Amino acid sequence: MRIQTLDLEPSCVAFAPDDTDHFVVGTYHLNSKAEKSDNSNAQDTPSLPQSRSGSLILYRLQGENFAFGSFENFATEDLSFNRSSSFHLLRELINFLIPRSRITQQTIKTDNGILDIAFSPSDYLDTGDTTTGIAAPSHRNLAVALSGGQIVFIQLECSPQAHWSSGCRLTNIENHQPFHESVLVLDIVWHPKRKGDLAVTLSTGEVVLCSLRRGESNTHIQTTQLFSHSLEAWTLSFSIDGRSLYSGGDDCVFACHDSEGADHAALWKDRRIHGAGVTAILPILSDFSDQNDHYKEALLTGSYDDHIRVLATPTGSGKRVTVLAELNLGGGVWRLTFIQAPSSLDSKSPGSLSLHWTILASCMYAGVRVVEVTKQGADWDIRIVARFEEHKSMNYGSDVRPRSAGDGPAHEIVSTSFYDRLLCLWQFAQGTHQECTE
């Protein structure tokens, strides 16, 4: 296990899907009045709105260590597209003297806090078709959700022949302001099939589709509001086929929306299942039957009520969401991520199918849990198979390194905690029961 203390509070983390040695951490800091007054007249300070700041940090795993450190030689570059941009490169640490096998780190400072980050799917790479007006990236893109109503796109460029020592770097591509600066963009996801389409949730409760469209001189975001929760909309996820969009809010509502129809109608909503705000949604199986019941999708949800649940969504209107299994994980279930899943999530399979999923759960004040979800015929079960409890404050961001050919049995996991600013690297071995504490 390796631990590092960050300068700012970590809120999210994501491994690069292709260059799996690299991962990105997003941070979120609520500035104090003293910090705000540093660059303003003291008598004006009381009227200033609450401000936030943050950063994106690119790391490279090296054996069982983070690649990080200090350098005597570094280059500084301004990547702002305009003066109002929230992003500028704080410093790009490049060492031409130390061999590539040693240490490298890149940090991008932001003038707003980062709430979520998401890498684009692999098939979003540009095919050279410019006739559709869709702004498809030529490299793997990172979408960044910020506290100032902004969405920023960062490009992860990787090349073994590159002059920067790690072979990868983050480059700011575009900055967009689709929402008012007082609004926090809380969660962001890419559409699984449609290039250039994303969806976000907002602190004002809205669930919004965002489409990147290429103009003559620039790219703009076209927004369509699908639904509005009465309180913060914490989380969302597209269905496996991309035709529906699920959302969850602090109002305990779990809702499903049509993401393709012209009217984007709300298909159904449920407020009876979750005892507190809905904070995580992860689809795991589509179009399946259990005994005499047929369901559109099975998915996992997390909630402030400390429970992870397996839910079955109805195939038509007038039917209710069904709870197939649930388990108390001891802390608010903020995020859910696959460690291991069946090779196909679109089973169209008989009820006798036996499947299992291994899930990484960020459980806020309880730390990290690894859970196994199993389906044996019509019976579903959830059990905890590992705990990581080194974190002493809120665990919001965790991710697992994507597997590569030749990897051993252990999965490498990076997890973070907010107020103590910890970044931890640890391992989970499939088929074992682990209790990771001090």
Image (spheres, rainbow, N blue to C red):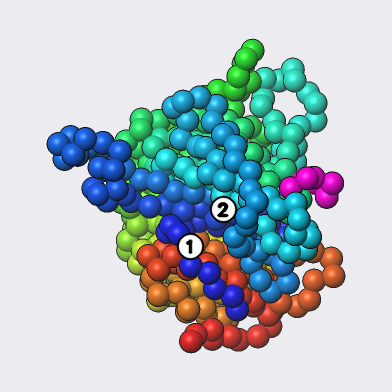
- The quadrant of the image that shows the N terminus is bottom right
Direction from residue 82 to residue 406 in the image, left or right: right
* Residue topped by disc 2: 57
Q: For the point 64% across and 76% down, which residue is it?
A: 427
Percent across and percent down for residue 426 are: 61, 75
- Kindly report the distance in space between the C-alpha atoms of the residues bearing marks 2 and 1: 10 Å
In the image, residue 238 lies at what x, y percent?
56, 45
Label 2 sits on what residue type? Ile
At label 2, counting other C-alpha atoms closer than 10 Å, the crowd grade (few under 14, some 14-19, many 20 or more) is some
Question: Residue 111's x, y, as percent?
Answer: 42, 40
SS assignment at label 2 = strand
Magenta stretch, residue numbers: 158-164
Q: Amino acid at mark 1?
A: Leu
> Which of the pair 231/78 is nearer the observer?
78
In the figure, is residue 350 to the left or right of 364? right
Residue 126 quadrant? top right
- Which residue carries the number 1 mark? 6
